[in-house]
Image: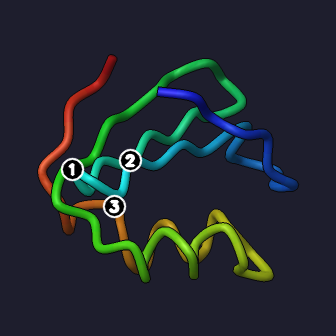
């Protein structure tokens, strides 16, 4: 999946596949997580958030099944 860089102090890049609802989040420390079943709206709000890290913690982290890549 292709990820795009974002302006965040904690997140380096974000990728999303709308067909499968798969969200990939790469953190600045190098870890990448893949989340399943993420609605398109959540992805759109995440990349548009004033604070991507804050939005991620409130709306993605621990809310969707995930695996570390």
Can you give x and y, in whole percent of width and height, for residue 16 in the image?
Answer: 46, 49
- Residue 55, image quadrant: bottom right
Q: Which mark is residue 20?
A: 1
Q: Which residue is the site of mark 3?
A: 61
Vertical order, 1 against 20 (above or below): above
Mark 2 element type: strand
Element type at mark 3? loop
* Marks 1 & 2, CB-CB < 8 Å contact: yes
For this orientation, the residue located farthest to the right is 7
How many angstroms separate mark 2 from mark 3 (CA)?
18 Å
Q: Earlier in the sequence, mark 2 or mark 3?
A: 2
What whole-number distance in Å separates the C-alpha atoms at marks 3 and 1?
18 Å
Check the image and report above or below for 58 versus 31. below
From the viewer's perspective, is the residue at label 3 or at label 1 nearer?
1
The residue that appears at 44% across and 40% down in the rendered structure is 24
- The location of residue 68, given as percent across then percent down, is 29, 24
**Mark 2: few, some, or many residues within 10 Å (few <14, many ≥20)?**
some
Residue 42 screen position, x and y as percent: 42, 77
> Where is mark 2, residue-wise?
17
Would you identify the image quadrant in which residue 46 lies? Answer: bottom right
Q: How many marks?
A: 3
Residue 5: image tag: none
Residue 4 in the image: state x and y as whole percent: 72, 39
At x 80% / y 50%, what residue is drawn? 6
Left or right: residue 46 versus residue 42 is right
């Amino acid at each position: 999946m292709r990820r795009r860089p974002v302006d965040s102090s904690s997140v380096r890049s974000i990728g999303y596949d709308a067909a499968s609802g798969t969200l990939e989040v790469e953190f600045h420390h190098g870890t990448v997580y893949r989340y399943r079943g993420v609605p398109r709206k959540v992805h759109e709000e995440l990349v548009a958030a004033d604070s991507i890290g804050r939005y991620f913690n409130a709306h993605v982290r621990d809310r969707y099944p995930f695996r570390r890549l």
